[in-house]
Every structure is written in C-alpha cells, then in structure tokens.
Amino acid sequence: MLNLALLLVAITTLTGSHTAFKVRSRLASSAFSQRLNHVPIIGEAYFEDLQGQNPVVTPEMLRKLNKTNAAPRHLQAALPSNRHQLEMLNAVNRERAIVGLYPLCMNTKLQNVALGHSIDMAVKNYMSHIGSDGSTVQQRIQTARYDSIAAGENVAAGNLTVAQVMKAWMNSTNHRANILRQKITMFGCGYAYNQKSTYKYYWTQNFGASRMEKCS
C-alpha cells in the first residue's frame, strides 16, 4: 500500500487501493523518486511466542550488544533521554488503556536491546528487524539475557516525534497488534538520530513477557 505520507511494509499481505501517478518527463520521475525515498517508513511487525525457549548466549553476541559507546560523535548527542523513554511508554499505555488492557512496565534489558538496534540502524543507514551483524530480534533479546516466553518488535525511520511514530504504528494492523497484545507485560524503546543517514530518525519498540524478569 503506497501513499505520500507513509511507505508501509508488513509481514502479512496488505490490501487496498493503489494510486497511479502520471509522470510527464524523466526529470519529474527522478524528482518524485528522490522525495519518496525520504518519507517516513515503518518496518515489518515482529512477534514470536517462545513458550520458555532457553536462550543461547555467546561472548561474541554480548560484545556486539555492548558497542553502544563506539557510536560516531555526531550520533552521541542523539541518544534517547528519559523523556523519550517515558513519553513512548506513556503513549503505549494510553492506547492499551483505551481497549481495557493493563499497562506495560519498562524493563532495562529490553530498553538496551531497543536502543542498541536503533543506534545500529542509524549508524549503518538501514531499517530492518535483522541487525547489520545478521542478528534476529530473538538473538538480540537472548544476548541481553532477557528470559523470554514471548517477544515482539516494531521499527520505524523518518518520524520526528513519538507522536508521529506512534500514529504510524497504530495505523498498521500488525504493529498495532504488538502494542495491544494481551500476553505482553514489559517494554523497552530506543531512538537514535544520524544527520548523515537517509531517514535521520530511527525508532525501535521491544515487547516481552517472562516468568522470571521484573520491571526495572
């Protein structure tokens, strides 16, 4: 589904109308493509019910996760403050309250996973659930030693504010499902900015449920 406001990629097949654009010249076509490449985007919505799968953690995975301090100088000032984290958590819990769901609590391990992935996307100039090192969502959560029975992730790029990215996610069936999922109890979010990258602003939400982990 394509429009000028949002380019959306989803795991499931999306249905809807397609808008046709008539381009009168090659120059106009090129200009349109350049503008389109910079509109905000959101990635696929990821969720996996793990039912207590035992994590496999390696020293190399831990080293990769802990490279946050190696981020470029132009990225350092953009690391998310408590304000970003609380604003995102409050936005998620407002949406859950509307449909009668209990609020999520922040978990430091999920917070670190989300932040690490947002920084990776900003530094390496991409947006995906697969990290630049080939890591999957579940591998990153296992690396952080989060004892998970269910995990989810939403990613986005190009949205300037929490309000904008939340609106984009809530307008997507699969991302909305992650935010409003009953089984999830814990939350972490990450934001990073890189002025040299295509989309500049990179966002990650990580969701979790666990028999062992606590709010932190």
Image (cartoon, rainbow, N blue to C red):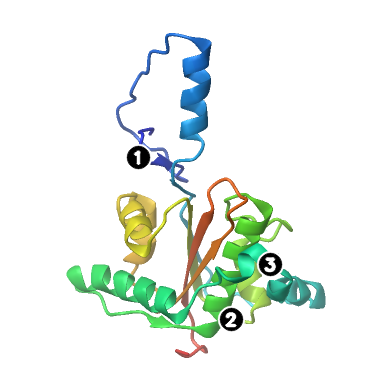
Q: Earlier in the sequence, mark 3 or mark 2?
A: 3
The spot of residue 47 in percent (x, y) is: 48, 61
| Rendered residue at 34%/60% (across/down) | 166
| Rendered residue at 51%/73% (across/down) | 80
Q: Nearer the viewer, residue 191 or 60?
A: 191
Q: Which residue is mark 1?
A: 5
Amino acid residing under circle 3: Arg
Query: Is residue 215 placed above or below 140 in the rendered structure?
Result: below
Would you identify the image quadrant in which residue 147 lies? bottom right
Number of numbered discs on residues: 3
Q: Residues within 10 Å of mark 1 (few under 14, many from 20)?
A: few
Q: Earlier in the sequence, mark 2 or mark 1?
A: 1
Amino acid residing under circle 1: Ala
Q: CA distance from mark 2 to mark 1?
A: 36 Å
Query: Is residue 128 placed above or below 7 in the rendered structure?
Result: below
Q: Residue furthest top?
A: 24
Q: Earlier in the sequence, mark 1 or mark 3?
A: 1
| Rendered residue at 44%/46% (across/down) | 40
What number is the disc on residue 146? 2
| 188 relative to 179 in the view: left or right | right
Q: CA distance from mark 1 to mark 3?
A: 31 Å
Amino acid residing under circle 2: Tyr
Q: CA distance from mark 3 to mark 2?
A: 30 Å
Q: Which-is-in-front pick, marks 3 and 2?
A: 3
| Rendered residue at 42%/53% (across/down) | 159
The secondary element bearing badge 3 is classed as helix
Q: Residues within 10 Å of mark 2 (few under 14, many from 20)?
A: many
The spot of residue 16 in percent (x, y) is: 30, 31
Would you identify the image quadrant in which residue 12 lies? top left
The spot of residue 170 in percent (x, y) is: 31, 56
Q: Which residue is mark 3?
A: 73
